[in-house]
């Protein structure tokens, strides 16, 4: 990979690499998810030490002929989005979804814009449900599983969603896994201002994302449960 012009990016994940470096997973506008080595980034005097953090808007440059590129430049274009409590854990949740579900070196420009908008909404402490559902639905669509109306509608029929088939008629679907035709239409015309739409989208996204993750547990969900348990204990 030859050196590219600076690209807008966010850090999704970092881990130590060798003695003083970092292995950084980036979500970039032009190339989607990429892995780079930030050499010396863990050194005390590193210019990158403070900015290679989640929720910091960056411009980055990288180069290299191998699969793992070298970070050559990184600069913050703004301060980190201020995130606290459940809004912070929600941002971590978005990062985990991108980290585990996106293909490497595949551009998702619309998803990148949605991700920025979601971080901004979380920083402003806007309602969590609306912010998360908008992002999840966009992610599902970008991964190639866009919603579509069932090909055969039967009054009173229940439908299940399967990744490779979409909505299919399923009269024996479990209560939590089945969707009425009216609920399918809600998802197709999703309105984050309506509580009924949010509840339907939450159930749908949980089902689809569980299929995509294929049993993988997310750290952010464990943190969510922990903070909710703590809040109940305090009350």
Image (tube, helix red, strand yellow):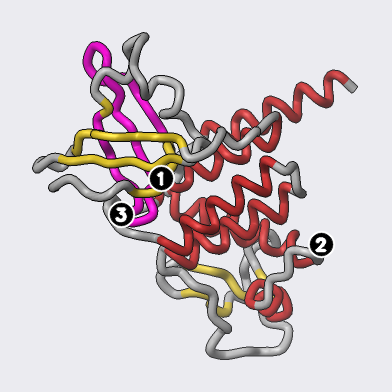
Task: Name the element at disc 3.
Answer: loop
Q: CA distance from mark 2 to mark 1?
A: 33 Å
Looking at the picture, how far across and down is residue 192, in whole percent? Answer: 73, 64
User: Which part of the image, by quadrant, shows the C terminus?
Assistant: top right
Task: Name the element at disc 1.
Answer: strand
Q: Is residue 91 left or right of residue 124?
A: left
Q: CA distance from mark 1 to mark 3?
A: 10 Å
Q: Is residue 100 visible?
A: no
Say which residue label 3 marks. 31
What span is colored magenta in the figure? 13-37
User: Marks 1 and 2: in contact by CB < 8 Å?
Assistant: no
Is 18 magenta? The answer is yes
Residue, far right: 235
Height in image: 54 above or below 150?
Answer: above
The one of 42 and 228 positioned closer to us in this rendering: 42
Task: Name the element at disc 2.
Answer: helix
């Amino acid at each position: 990979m030859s050196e590219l012009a600076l690209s807008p990016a966010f850090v999704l994940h970092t881990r130590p690499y060798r003695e003083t470096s970092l292995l950084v997973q980036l979500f970039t506008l032009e190339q989607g998810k990429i892995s780079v080595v930030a050499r010396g980034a863990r050194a005390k005097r590193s210019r990158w030490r403070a900015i290679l953090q989640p929720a910091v808007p960056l411009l980055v440059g990288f180069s290299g002929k191998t699969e793992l590129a070298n970070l050559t430049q990184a600069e913050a274009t703004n301060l980190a989005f201020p995130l606290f409590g459940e809004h912070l854990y929600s941002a971590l949740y978005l990062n985990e979804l991108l980290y585990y579900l996106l293909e490497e070196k595949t551009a998702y420009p619309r998803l990148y814009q949605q991700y920025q908008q979601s971080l901004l909404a979380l920083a402003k402490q806007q309602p969590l449900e609306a912010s998360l559902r908008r992002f999840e639905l966009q992610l599902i669509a970008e991964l190639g599983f866009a919603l579509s109306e069932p090909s055969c509608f039967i009054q009173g029929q229940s439908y299940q969603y399967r990744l490779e088939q979409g909505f299919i008629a399923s009269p024996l679907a479990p209560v939590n896994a089945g969707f009425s035709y009216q609920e399918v239409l809600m998802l197709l015309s999703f309105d984050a201002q309506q509580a009924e739409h949010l509840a339907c989208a939450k159930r749908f996204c949980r089902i689809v994302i569980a299929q995509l993750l294929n049993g993988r547990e997310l750290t952010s969900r464990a943190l969510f449960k922990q903070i909710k348990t703590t809040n109940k204990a305090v009350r």
